[in-house]
Image: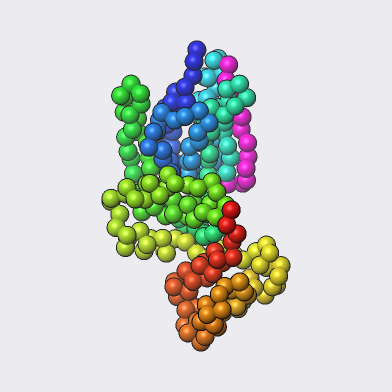
Amino acid sequence: MEVKTEDAVVAILDELKSAEYCLVKRSANLPCLAPGSDLDLYVRDLASVQAAVASRLVAFEQAGLTIRETPVSKYQCHVDLLQDDQILVRFDLYSAVPQFHSVSLKSEYFQQVLESRIISQVKDSSGKSVSIYVPSDAMEFVLRVCEYAEFYWTGPDKIHHVDFLLGSANLTREDGLRILHEVTEVPPVCGEYAAASPRLARGSLRDKVRFLSGELPGWVRSWLSTPALARLRESSAGSRLELAVRASRRPRV
């Protein structure tokens, strides 16, 4: 019996209809996904959802497929359905916000996603409706902006997130930016920056900009060293400025 990705996706969505989950970054082709695709699910109870997904996928073993469960962290795991040792579909389960390096999502974002989730309908290849829980437009906007920013310099280029954002007519730019500032923050400075300046991680915005702006043009460095910068320290504009300075240090590839 030939098994399509769609078969497994529909089976799992049906299995989880009473679970507290939210399918984020939904593909426009759901549930008819290409082999090798993955579904990102925010779940309240990681252990129980992992067990439910794996249990439902057992039915596909009769067709020669195999199941692989891989813990990624305390808050994330993969449940893969394999065909000839290749991933047919991956269910990527999270019980906390993913960690980004360009911009950090506050921990409360995860709770907000689950609390504001909405029910939606997609149609399978036969035209049958399948119910799914997805984020509100605002919560989806935030996650896609963060993921696009995360991979902007290093690839792969997440153009599908831009396509979604440009096509999202239910959220004004003002509302999108407001919620983005509410649930994101500047991530801790680490790695080469922290190693080069031990006080950088705990220093003021002025200290960080002085260090991080070393490769910026002279007129920019001059402006950043002015007293006006102190007034930005506690403001959201200050956070955005720090992000911009840090981004300027990233190598283009």
Q: Residue at x 67, y 62 (%)?
A: 191
Q: Residue at x 40, y 49 (%)?
A: 162
Is any part of residue 88 visible from this angle?
yes
Q: Residue at x 35, y 26 (%)?
A: 124
Q: Position of residue 101 (x, y in %)?
A: 57, 57
Vertical comparison of 8 with 113: above or below: above
Which of the 4 image quarters holds residue 183? Answer: bottom left
Q: Nearer the viewer, residue 77 or 237?
A: 237
The residue stretch that appears in magenta:
64-75
Q: Position of residue 95 (x, y in %)?
A: 52, 46
For this orientation, the residue located farthest to the bottom is 227
Vertical comparison of 31 with 192: above or below: above
Vertical comparison of 176 with 47: above or below: below
Q: Position of residue 11 (x, y in %)?
A: 44, 26
Q: Position of residue 115 (x, y in %)?
A: 39, 50
Q: Main secondary structure of the magenta part?
A: strand
102 with respect to 165 (left or right)? right
